[in-house]
Amino acid sequence: MRADPAIPMIEADCPALCSGDGFTGGAVARSEPGSIANAGSPSMASTVLPLAGEDCANRSRGSSCGARSAHDDIGDPAAASRSLPALNGNVAPGDIGDVLATVLARLRCLARSEAGTHAAAPEPRGISLADASMLFDGVRECASALGRIQSTLNDEMNRRHSLEREIDDTQAALALALSELAGTRAGERHALHLAHHDELTSLPNRAYFFERLDEELDIRAGRREALAVLHLDLDGFQSFNERHGKAIGDEFLRIVGFRLSRAVRADDVVCRLGGDQFGLLLADVHGHAQLGGLAGKLADAIAAPMQIGKRSLRVHASIGIAVSPGHGVVSDLLMRNAGIAMRLARREQSNFAFFDSTACPQAAPECPV
């Protein structure tokens, strides 16, 4: 731009913005961390500091280029005195604000210099080649800076979308893992239930019954606390099953298990030992009278007619009772003696019988459980 005394504000007031030597305007360039000037590192920028006494704002003279407004530099007082660096890479996200402020101030100063050139001319004339070149270079550098900012914003948007996709994928994977874990735990609980329960009646099975019996006997070891086991067998159930079919027989067994469970206390254990045999574990019993009354109640519950489809069916049961510690202090012996008592009740055609060592010695091979 030619030096025109009529418009000293162009070069005197805005040396960093309106000179044609790369917008340094005689200022001293300083590279600061976090800026964007360094071509080899998009995170470095060259900030041009005005020489002592130079101030584009030039508030002391109140010139038009130095006059500040709310739109001049987005809050940065030195924005108009900064030179646009050579941008060979994208603008670092943290430097976008500074670069935008510098571009804005640069464009305004270029516009004012163009307006000042025409206002100072004695008569209308075209813009000089030097002025046009300076304006072209300035606008080109501003456009380049804005393009770099746009590229940076596009990269940041793509990165954000990539992070959102990663978050969505991670959440989906976590949900799947939680679902699989819940399924695994449910499978473990189901497997544990099957290991300790009868599939047909859902009652505890023989293995669980003996585990509980061993635990209760260990608790009472050395003490004189009574513990009773009952061995219950359905009379003639094999012929019943052959006569009515397996489906009717299975339903009959389910009903028996249900009736037995309802007839005892919540803390008592009812299990299906196998086939048509059931076992009961009763803690805190008080004498033969109590046990005899309960056994009679159980026999009556099973003997009551059962309506299965259109059929009313009945089966009687024989119940053997053994009481610890008198009839044994280990589970195998106690259950063996309860089985002996059950066969005694069947032989005598009684609903129940207590173990009697004189009727069938414990070691007799003809009295198996």
Image (spheres, grey):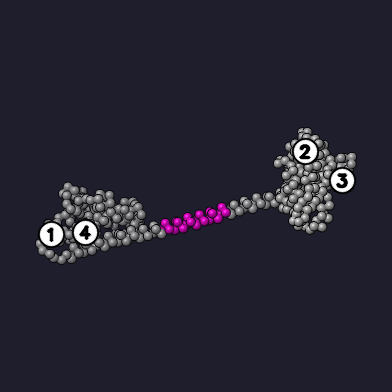
* Residue bearing mark 4: 110
Local crowd at mark 4 within 10 Å, few (<14), some, or many (≥20)?
A: many
Q: Residue at x 86, y 42 (%)?
A: 362
* Residue bearing mark 2: 227
Q: Which mark is residue 56?
A: none
For marks 4 and 1, give the CA distance: 15 Å
Q: Viewer-nearest of labels 2 and 3?
A: 3
| Residue 344 placement: quadrant | top right
Residue 68 in percent (x, y) is at 22, 50
Residue 358 in percent (x, y) is at 89, 40
Q: Taking 73 as reference, is 237 left or right?
A: right
**Amino acid found under the numbered disc labelled 3:** Gln
Q: Taking 155 as reference, is 6 left or right?
A: left
In this view of the protein, which residue sits in the foreground, 256 or 132?
256
**Amino acid found under the numbered disc labelled 2:** Leu
Taking the image as drawn, is residue 150 in sight? yes
Q: Which mark is residue 120?
A: 1
| Residue 295 placement: quadrant | top right
Where's the N terminus, which quadrant?
A: bottom left
* Residue bearing mark 3: 349
- Main SS, magenta region, reads helix
Is residue 41 depicted above or below 350 in this figure?
A: below
Q: Residue at x 21, y 64 (%)?
A: 133
**Amino acid found under the numbered disc labelled 1:** Ala
In this view of the protein, which residue sits in the foreground, 227 or 120?
227
Residue 182 lies in the magenta stretch = no
- Dot 1 or dot 3: first in sequence order is 1
- Dot 2 or dot 4: first in sequence order is 4
Q: Viewer-nearest of labels 4 and 3?
A: 3
In this view of the protein, which residue sits in the foreground, 7 or 229?
229
Q: Secondary structure at mark 3?
A: loop
Magenta segment: 159-179
